[in-house]
Structures are given as C-alpha cells and as structure tokens.
Image (cartoon, coloured by chain):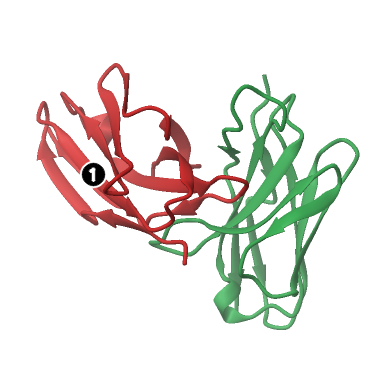
Chain colours: A red, B green
Amino acid sequence: GENVEQHPSTLSVQEGDSAVIKCTYSDSASNYFPWYKQELGKRPQLIIDIRSNVGEKKDQRIAVTLNKTAKHFSLHITETQPEDSAVYFCAARRVSSYKLIFGSGTRLLVRP
Amino acid sequence: DAGVTQSPTHLIKTRGQQVTLRCSPKSGHDTVSWYQQALGQGPQFIFQYYEEEERQRGNFPDRFSGHQFPNYSSELNVNALLLGDSALYLCASSLEQGITDTQYFGPGTRLTVL
C-alpha cells in the first residue's frame, strides 16, 4: 500500500550546523514530493518540492534530493537558525492521484 | 492576496453530535482537499473536491462528507462524532489548471469531541 516513512522523529542541532531529514516511499508510481514546515499551532507551510524528473532542487539554505531507484528523498537545511525549529513533514503523491501521503514528521530543534 | 481561511478555529462537541467545518480557498484556486491531523502525526487525506464534486476519497467512513460551492468554498461534515474524531482538520487549496498543483494549507479547525 501507500506509505511514507520519515526519520528521525526528533533532531537537535547547534545553530549554524546542517540538518538532514530522510523519507522513504513505497509506491513506485509517486512523482511529486513536497516538504512542509509546521510551527506549533500554525498551518503546514510548503518550503520546497521536487518532481520525479529532477534529482535535486535548491532554494537558498534548503535543498531536496531524490533517489527514484531507492525510493527515498531527503531535506537538507544548511546554516540552521533558531527560527528553523519546527516540525517538518515530507509527503508523496502518485501519478493520477490527488492525495498527499504524509510522513509522521520530524521535530527539529535548533539550539542557539 | 487572501490565503486559505477556515472557520471556526476551535470547536467542542460531544459524542454522537454532528459538526460542519468551513474552508475558503486561496484566491484564484478552484480545488479543495481536506485532511485530518491527529496529535503528533502527519495529515491524513479525507477527500478532494473539484467542480463541486468529490473526486477522490481517502480511508474515511461515510460519516465524513463534504460539499463544494460554486464560489469554490467547501464544507466538511462529520456525523455521529466519536472520541477518535478529535483532531486538527486542515483544508488545502490548489489550482487544477495551474503550472503546479501545489496544495496550500489553511490554519485548521481544532475539533475536540468529549
């Protein structure tokens, strides 16, 4: 069935260090992979997304990589700042489907 | 440019009652999806509405139903509430014919069932 596994569940880094969150999907027909950031009590906000015809995408301090063969994708945050502290969710969507399948989330804490 | 809005913000109901949640999509968007987010978990897809019809549904019972209006706004109805229905209900809007069909989320409605 459709499933997205996300690791780690919690991640604590020192300000200025890099953070990496990894997700694995089960449906090989998945072709769209967004990442959302959710601060406490707020809405999930899209921070970056990637489609299956691209292997990597960058936006300032954030990058996402996709390995279709291994069916996994990762979020990389460089030069972390305290305001990066939040819960991050990965998601996947298959071709011809409209639903996003979410991972269980990673709570990122950036220590000043 | 108005983002996705939802009402009410919070709601408390008792078991067996019925509830209606409302969503207005981002300006220019025509598609609305609903998700349920239990505490500490990722959102789970309930269904999506486009052209006033439900076009895809997740693994939720028939107690969950919805509607989309001509102005693209949407309602989520839940009948015969159970304690397990307590969650944050998120709606997300997107544009069917856009360059991308990225889903943008509203702030959610926190439903507590006692």
Work out which quarter of the rendered image holds the C terminus of chain B and state it.
Answer: bottom right
User: In the rendered structure, the residue with mark 1 lies on which chain?
Assistant: A
Q: Nearer the viewer, residue A84 or B56?
A: B56
Q: Nearer the viewer, residue B74 or A91?
A: A91
Q: Residue at x 39, y 42 (%)?
A: A39
Q: Is residue B21 left or right of residue A61?
A: right
Q: Quadrant of residue B2?
A: top right
Q: Nearer the viewer, residue A66 or B92?
A: A66
Q: Residue at x 58, y 37 (%)?
A: B103
Q: Residue at x 67, y 19 (%)?
A: B1
Location of residue B105 with respect to A64 vertically, above or below: below
Location of residue B111 with respect to B98 vertically, above or below: below
Judging from the image, what secondary structure is the residue with disc 1 in?
A: strand
Q: Position of residue B9 (x, y in %)?
A: 63, 50
Kindly tell me whether residue B5 is visible in this rendering: yes
Q: Please, what is the three-letter code of the amino acid marked with disc 1?
A: Ile
Q: Residue furthest front?
A: A69
Q: How crowded is the residue under tag 1: few (<14 C-alpha within 10 Å), some, or many (20+)? A: many
Q: Residue at x 14, y 46 (%)?
A: A12
Residue indicated by mark 1: A21
Location of residue B83 with respect to B20 vertically, above or below: below
Q: Position of residue B10 (x, y in %)?
A: 62, 56
Q: Quadrant of residue A25?
A: bottom left
Kindly tell me whether residue A40 is visible in this rendering: no
